[in-house]
Image (spheres, grey):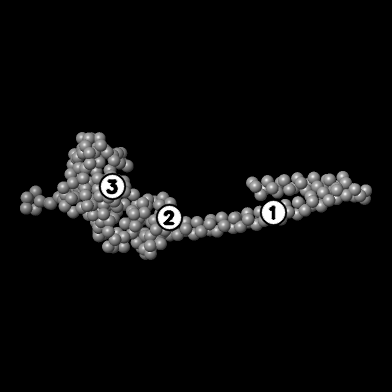
Amino acid sequence: MDENNAEVVEEVVEEKYLELLIEKDSQGLVAVASTNATDRMGEIVDNNGWDLKAYKKNPVILWGHDHTQLPIGTSTKTWVEGTGKSAKLMIKPELHDVTPLAAAAKELVDRGIIKTLSVGFRPLESPDGITFTKNELLEVSLVNVPANAEAMMMAYKSLHDKGFDKEVIEDMGVKVDVVERLVEMDEKINELSELVKVQQHQSKKHAEKRLNVQKAIVRAADKLLAKQDSTVDRSLTKTIKRATELLTVAEKEKLNG
């Protein structure tokens, strides 16, 4: 093949990802990658072998690895802490609120709803294709809200109450239509709960009324028994009193139960 007409083959950069847990310390936020972490693909990233030079020249933080969006923040400090088995990749994120997407992301991080960063890196050395001993850090991203219902509900409520548009909330990974149905169901459950409480309260009031009536019957029976009138059927009066006493005990147990 003529060298002048040789095809130019672009190098394909294989990018892998590693999650970092966002924590809060006395100086603000910090993201930490556990020592020699095994990721979800079963691969091991050796934190002793990070090449951070390229990233430190432009330490922006993206949203969901999306290079088409404006950055949502920067890493004010990126370093490896410790050595050997205790080595950890550390990133100190600082998020802004200049754009709606960045403001929403900052809100969810501040509330502890989003708790992870994801770093994109290029493996440089690997003895077995599973353990990566040297890696170049390419970019850092905040990742979407977890897909579980509780996290989505928390994110939806937080952003909705702050006045964020539906489109922005959806951009954060929240399935708004699903969450709105969950919110509606939750409201119905709360209404039902309140109705049950009212009914229980009314049942208690009715039980108290029945108890008062039964007590009155017992008192009347006592008065009849106290009379020495032969016209009074004492055995019938005793039966009425005994039956009423049993009912009274049952009502008290309901009220106290």
Q: Quadrant of residue 155?
A: bottom left
The residue indicated by pointer 2 is 153
Q: Nearer the viewer, residue 250 or 162?
A: 250
Q: Is residue 177 above or below residue 239?
A: below
Q: Residue at x 31, y 52 (%)?
A: 143
Amino acid of disc 2: Met
How many marks the image carries: the answer is: 3
Residue 121 position, x and y percent, is: 22, 46
Residue 127 position, x and y percent, is: 20, 35
Amino acid of disc 3: Ala
Q: Nearer the viewer, residue 54 or 107?
A: 107
Asked if the residue under mark 2 is in contact with the one under mark 1, i.e. CB atoms within 8 Å, the reply is no
Asked if the residue under mark 1 is in contact with the one under mark 3, i.e. CB atoms within 8 Å, the reply is no
Q: Residue at x 85, y 48 (%)?
A: 226
Q: Residue at x 77, y 53 (%)?
A: 216
Residue 135 position, x and y percent, is: 20, 43
The residue indicated by pointer 3 is 31
Choose the circle earlier in sequence order: 1 or 2: 2
Outermost residue to the right: 230
The residue indicated by pointer 1 is 208
- Please give left or right for residue 26 compared with residue 54 in the image: right
Q: Residue at x 66, y 54 (%)?
A: 204
- The mark lying in front, picked from 2 and 3, is 3
Say the numbered circle drawn on residue 244: none
One can see residue 22 in this view: no
Amino acid of disc 1: Glu
Q: Nearer the viewer, residue 74 or 46?
A: 74
Residue 148 position, x and y percent, is: 41, 50
Q: Secondary structure at mark 1?
A: helix
Choose the circle earlier in sequence order: 3 or 1: 3
One can see residue 115 in this view: yes
Choose the circle earlier in sequence order: 2 or 3: 3
